Amino acid sequence: MTETKVCPHCKQLLPLTAFHNNRSRASGRDVWCGACKNEARKAQRKRVRDAKRAARALLPPKPKTQKARRRPLREKIVVPLKYPQLGDEAWLRGRICREFVAAEEVAEELGCALSTVYAAMQRHNVRSPPKGVRAALRARVLQQKQEAQG
Ligand SMILES: [Zn+2]
């Protein structure tokens, strides 16, 4: 005959094997059956979870995240130009497209890198004529200047 025991929670008469081992008890088994014990444990975990959630809701809200505090993208940061002439489209266009000065010479004139001049040209959509053409055009401009001076 298999040993049985009544679970005081669900009041069922169950075989002893339905009760978990528990060495701290004289019987060597839990008081409640395994199913009741598992359910009780689950309910207890939920109570703790809900209590923590409720406590959190009472706390002041957390400071906003790093992302939300970041400067909005639309706000432009104005950095003063190191070479103000390169920010002046009319000046740059005059040098490159009317006087036909080479970008290299503009860089030398301003004391900046050639790439800085190219970047400014790209920004203002200023295009230098092809090398040979530019030189010829420049020679003509210089000649006209000299003729005008007498
Ligand atoms: Zn039970």
Image: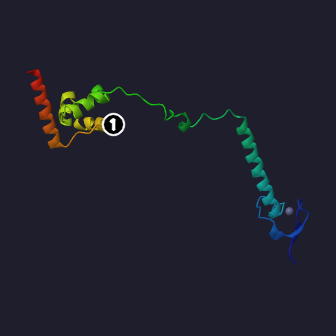
User: Can residue 133 be seen from the camera position used here?
Assistant: yes
Q: Vertically, is 115 above or below 87?
A: below
Q: Depth check: 87 or 44 in front?
A: 87
Which quarter of the figure has residue 16?
bottom right
Residue sticking out furthest to the bottom: 1
Ligand 1's image quarter is: bottom right
Image point (10%, 30%), residue name: 143
Q: Where, quadrant-wise, is the C terminus in this rendering?
A: top left
Q: Depth check: 106 or 114 in front?
A: 106
Q: Vertically, is 145 above or below 116?
A: above
Q: Horizontal and vertical percent for residue 64?
A: 59, 35
Q: Horizontal and vertical percent for residue 129?
A: 21, 41
Image point (22%, 30%), residue name: 95
Q: Where, quadrant-wise, is the N terminus in this rendering?
A: bottom right
Q: Vertically, is 22 above or below 82?
A: below
Image point (75%, 46%), residue name: 50
Which quarter of the figure has residue 145?
top left
Would you say 45 lies left or right of 110 here?
right
Q: Dot 1: few (<14), some (14–19), or many (≥20) neighbours within 10 Å? A: few
Residue sticking out furthest to the top: 149
Q: Depth check: 53 or 126 in front?
A: 126
Disc 1 is placed on an element classified as helix
Which quarter of the figure has residue 120?
top left
- Going by the numbered disc 1, the residue's amino acid type is Arg
Q: Horizontal and vertical percent for residue 61?
A: 66, 34
Asked which colour scheme the image uses, the reply is rainbow
